[in-house]
Amino acid sequence: MHATTPSRVSNVGSAWAALAAAVFLVASTQGEVTFRLQLTEVPQEISPLVYGVNDWNRGEAGESLNYTLERLGGNRMTGYNWENNYSNAGSDYFHHSDWHLVNSESEENKSKPGWAVSMSVDHAQDAGRPSLVTLQLAGYVAADGNGTVSEADTAPSDRWAEVRLRKEGEYTLTPDTTDGVVYMDEQVNFLIQTYGLSSEGGVFAYSLDNEPALWAHTHSRIHPDAPTVAEIVRVGADCAAMVKDLDAEALIFGPALFGWGSFVDFSAPDWSSYSGEYDWFVSAYLGEMKKQSDAAERRLLDVLDIHFYPEVSVVTGTDEEGADVYTRITDSTSDDEALTQARLQAPRSLWDSNYVEESWITTWSTGGEAVQLLPRVFESIETHYPDTELSISEYDYGGHQNYSGGLAQADVLGIYGRDGVYAACYWGEIEGYVIPAFQLYRNYDGQGSSFGELSVPVENPDAANFSCYASVDVTDQTFHVVAINKTDAAQSTTLDLSQTGLVFDKMDTYGFSEASGPELVAQGSQEGRFEGSVSLDLPARSAMHFVFHSPEQTEDLLEILGSEADGTLRARYRPSVGAIRSLQTSQDLQHWTDEISVIPGDGLVRELELKPEGTSGFWRITESD
């Protein structure tokens, strides 16, 4: 992976690639569900940045999520002037210029250069989170806070300050607010001088503005003409080069596309100049940014950044003329059952080839085929700019006060981690069932404990009714399973460990459901011996987190527990974290062969059967090649 993911995992992933543990979700004929661990697929590291939140969600409720990335973005940031903290609302509110981003601050602080950005970065750093900060590329930013900007005052006018990427001359931390020009490199320098370089704990990453395909609509007083592909690539590459000149390790996210329409053709006037070479704008942006990077002899795009708000709509009534009324799942707080069921299924459009959502996307864009957003985007990345990471810096599935909103949010977080998304930031109110959905992964015990760092793949033959995600936490050496029951009946389930050798002596259960309400509840702990088949219960319409603890065992010691009548020995082994070992056997202590070629350093205890060949045998644990 090109961009470095902050992580606690060392070389455990490569060991798991050889051991290749996977979890299978199998529906039995009795209606039960079995989560079966098999040695078939390769797990991967979960990026910790997928549990991010957009900056405006500061507050006690937000802190309870223990989220991992803080993005300062949104429509307001396109017209933000770092020199005086004025910004413009665009079409969200009458193209109003004001101090909205710093309204809660003192008059003194409102006038301090970069104060709106500093508020966000300070908040993130106080909690030990990295920051993603938006830079301004639409050409102009608010010059004043004098309210609504009329169409007659569309830029260029004295209501706006011109944006320039580079300043000729020395930088200052107290810029001239009367010269009509705002410099982006001076803003980046301000952040470096205040917080240090990215490698020193400063701003982690910069976003190349926000939703540029909508500038002509959202910010028609700033950029009244629809941007072209050539423009957005040129200004993005130039800005990225500027940032890299000042802070080589800072990551570049871009272009923060608003949704499916911008993915397809960007609504760009010059799209026909690119459509012969590229299948959609996502590919074009990647390909053209790679050309810019190759010419500059350095990478200018680290993370492809998109926004994805599901477009799924269902019939919720009729109008006065008897025509069907469609409601989008993100636009309603209704408990309408059709909306609820549609919301539960909507996360499948991220990956599932068998799920075709009801939306204008599948009707008019995909030709009736599944959306499969992540596979489509990853294919474009692999084809046009390999090793670029993927971010979804805005998303929201709605229904916050309905159980379906919580289950969808929990489902999405599991998908992001499983499928290799690098970063994601929720956009929406932190309320209702959204809170326990985040806590399920990031603060399940109220003490900041989280889902593991290493994803264990899950095969799910019934994605309409269930979701399942599994991981290993190599830090505290626990095994985690998050299971989601979308049905209206409790499900008796089984976790089959029989083919893994894993053994546990304690299981903790946490979760939420429609019955429990929007609160994560500790369901209790069970102690005993958990091996082979373990019974798990999923309440109706619930998301549960099962945490398995390994028994006490000295690391890297092969302990013999006993023997069978046929001479087979029962042994227990716990690899040290990060170490990769092999189990070898010999009959003469001279010639050794691998019985288990790779044992991953996950810290989990497993029990092994050692079967001698002939009348005697020897075994040893050694470092794996």
Image (cartoon, rainbow, N blue to C red):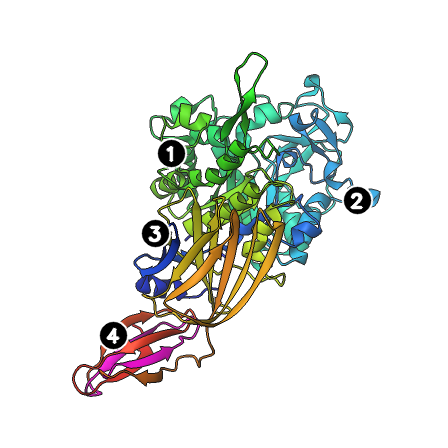
Label ID, residue 595: 4
Indicate whether residue 537 is drawn in magenta: no
Separation (CA) of disc 2 from disc 1: 47 Å
| Mark nearer the N terminus (1 vs 4) | 1
Give the extent of the magenta segment.
567-590
Above or below 593: residue 227: above
Q: Nearer the viewer, residue 316 or 443?
A: 316
Report helix, strand or loop for mark 2.
loop
Can you identify the residue that label 2 sits on? 105
The picture quadrant where one finds residue 182 is: top right
Instruction: Answer with left or right where residue 197 lies relative to residue 581.
Output: right
Report helix, strand or loop for mark 4.
strand
Report helix, strand or loop for mark 3.
loop
Residue 58: x, y in percent? 69, 48
| Mark nearer the N terminus (3 vs 2) | 3
| Mark nearer the N terminus (2 vs 1) | 2
The amino acid marked with disc number 4 is Glu
